[in-house]
Structure formats: C-alpha cells, structure tokens
Image: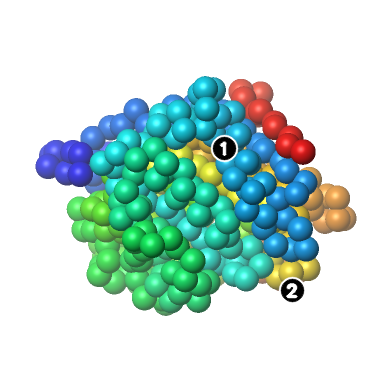
Amino acid sequence: MTGMNAPRLCLHRRKFLTTLAGGPLLLSSCVSSKTELSRLGIPGLFKGRVVSVEHPGSILGGAYQAEPVREMIRRGMVGLTGAGDWQAAWRLFFEPGDVVGIKLNPVGYPHVASAPEVVREIIASLTAIGIKPQDIVCYDRYRAQFLNAGFDKWLPEKVRWTHAAEDYETWQQGIEGYDPDHYMELPLVLPGQDPASLTARRSFAARFITRDVNKLINLCLLKDHQSAGITMALKNLSHGLVNNVNRSHATNTMNSCNSFIPASVSIPVIRNKTVLNIMDGIKGLYHGGPGARPEFVWEHKKMYFATDPVAMDHVGWRVIDEKRLAVGMKKLVEDTPDAFSHFTHRQPEHVEIAGALGLGVFDWAKIDRREIRLA
C-alpha cells in the first residue's frame, strides 16, 4: 500500500474543549502512522458538502426496492461531485487497481442494518468503472455478527469479505486481526485495569484497513446510540475499525465517546483511506440504539452522500432530533435514561469535537446542504 514504508510518525494533540453540557474535556491522544497524506482522505474532496436524496418508493411494505435505490445512489454521487454522469462521479474516487473496502454495519439486524440492495449497487458502481470484484472487500469488525446478518450470503461472486475479531467480548484487547504499527493511545482504561499498561491505553487499527485495502467506503446508518448519541459516519469508523473500544463507554456513567471517537478517526491510516461516506437513511432508528427495536424504527426514505463525516453526522444528528421531537421525545442532549436507553448523558458532541480537530465542518451555517427529491 502507498506509504507503508514511510517512517513512523507520532502526533500529539492536547485540546481543552467544552462539551455541549458545559463541562470541560481534556482530549489527549497519540496516534501512530506509516501512511502518507491523501487528498482524498477525510474531510475529502468536498469538505462541508452533504447531499440527501429522497425517493418515496425506496421502501415498500418494509422491503428495500432495488431500482429506486440504484437511482438514489447514482443521483447522489452526481449531486455530491458535480460530475457529468454517475460513472464519472465514481471515477473521482476510484480507479482500476484500487482495492476498495466497504465498511458494513450489522448491529441493528434485522431491523436497521446494511441492506443488500444498497451494498450490491455500490459494488455494481465500482465494477462498472473497472474495479475487479476480487478487489472489493466487505468488512465488519466481528465475524459472528457479519454471518448472523447474512452478509456473506448475498455478496456478488468473487467479492471478498473479512473481519478483525470473532465476536464481541468485554476486554477487546486481543491483537490478532489488528496492526501494532497503527494505533491511538488515549489515557483511558477500563475499570480495574492499570492506566500505565499500553495494552489497556491503546486501540489498534484493524489489519483490514492497514493492509488489505487502499481506499474505504464508509457505509453507515441513520441511528441513535445510547452513549454516543448517534452512530453514523464517525462512529462507524471509530468503533468498527479499532479494538479496545469498551473503554469509551464502560458503564452508564463512565462515558467518553466524545474523546474516543474523534481520536480514533484521527488515526492517519483511517483518516487517509476513508474517501467516501454513504449513509443509508431509508430506514432510521431514533431511540434505544445501537441495537434496533422495531418500535423506534421509521422509514425516512433518504440516503446521504459526503466525503466529510462531520458535516454528514451533524445533518444526521438534526434528522434524529427532529424525529424525536415529532414523536414527543426530547432532543438527544436533553434526554434522560429510560427502559431502552440507559446512559446518564449521551454524547453527540463527539461530532463537534471531531470538527474542532479538523476532521470536517460542524458549523451549520457553513455546511453546503443539497437536497434531491426523486419521483
């Protein structure tokens, strides 16, 4: 991969920030990298731009409709890039010889998870511009969850899939499936662990992103999350591509997603290889996440396209809040625990902090929001 022989670089960031709740936050992290900077990397070619595409026929009777999904993705890519046609739009990011990863999300299965109609159309778009099927790699962190969602059963022939670990477990500090040369070190450990232990303080990037692919499509979902507030573009990267993530939300009161998520996405190998974010909002989840209960699922019938994950997540955050208010609930930052969401304070402010670290545009007035409605 490009830059894999470059010298090791350690970046230190100390930022005193203020959370949305008004409390001080010390974010101190060290990241290691052997990758070169990329003009395509986060925040990408179209910093601050978010395109939404709505199609009322995208889901009927609870089932995704392949043809409307195809049209949404093609129009969304043209809307994002301004290219003359959908193939030219894809060629701005990918070329023959690339090995392209697609980060899926099975956590809310069967109610809100990566949909075959969406994934297949992304794959078809890549192959249409000359990417070989065997050079496309679909991924989620846990093999068991990938298989439980049935992702392996509907991938096109020759398209590969992989994982970083077998299944969820509490400590999540095993190094198999991860790359010791690429990590984020944050002085935060699980209760009972030694704060001086490097294993406890570090989160290593998956070998999938460091060695298997040179570009990544971040296929995220429009979802609520009990501790992080939302789980969209940023969190799909942070908690899907590194180990030792439980320390970010170890208990209902020990919640540090506002630090952990931006620090993880700042790992250069993740930041530089993530070139495109597509959010499937055809179905959304507005409460009780990340696992999806059907009573909190709604048909939003939109997809979102961006190279900037911060701008995308700010747009998605507002969509979730609007839905919550429409059903008589409080906004995410005002919410209190209930039977389905147990954390004392949610932390969607991780999106604003990511913006402060240069991962994208958070300022609502500076986000270039473009809306497309299809028949």
Asked which colour scheme the image uses, the reply is: rainbow
Please provide percent x and percent y for residue 195: 32, 64
Residue in the image at 46% along x and 48% along y: 124
Q: In this orientation, which residue lies closer to the viewer: 187 or 335?
A: 335
**Quadrant housing residue 75:** top right
* Amino acid carrying mark 2 in the image: Ala
> Could you tell whether 326 is left or right of 122 in the image?
right
Q: Residues within 10 Å of mark 2 (few under 14, many from 20)?
A: few
Q: Which of marks 1 and 2 is nearer the N terminus?
A: 1
**Res 162 → quadrant:** bottom left
Residue type marked 1: Arg
Tell which of 318 and 85 is nearer to you. 85
For residue 171, say whether it is visible. Answer: no
Q: Residue at x 14, y 38 (%)?
A: 6
Query: Which residue sits at x=67%, y=38%?
Result: 53
Q: Name the residue under label 1.
A: 74
Q: In which quarter of the image is the N terminus?
A: top left
> In terms of secondary structure, where does tag 2 sit?
loop
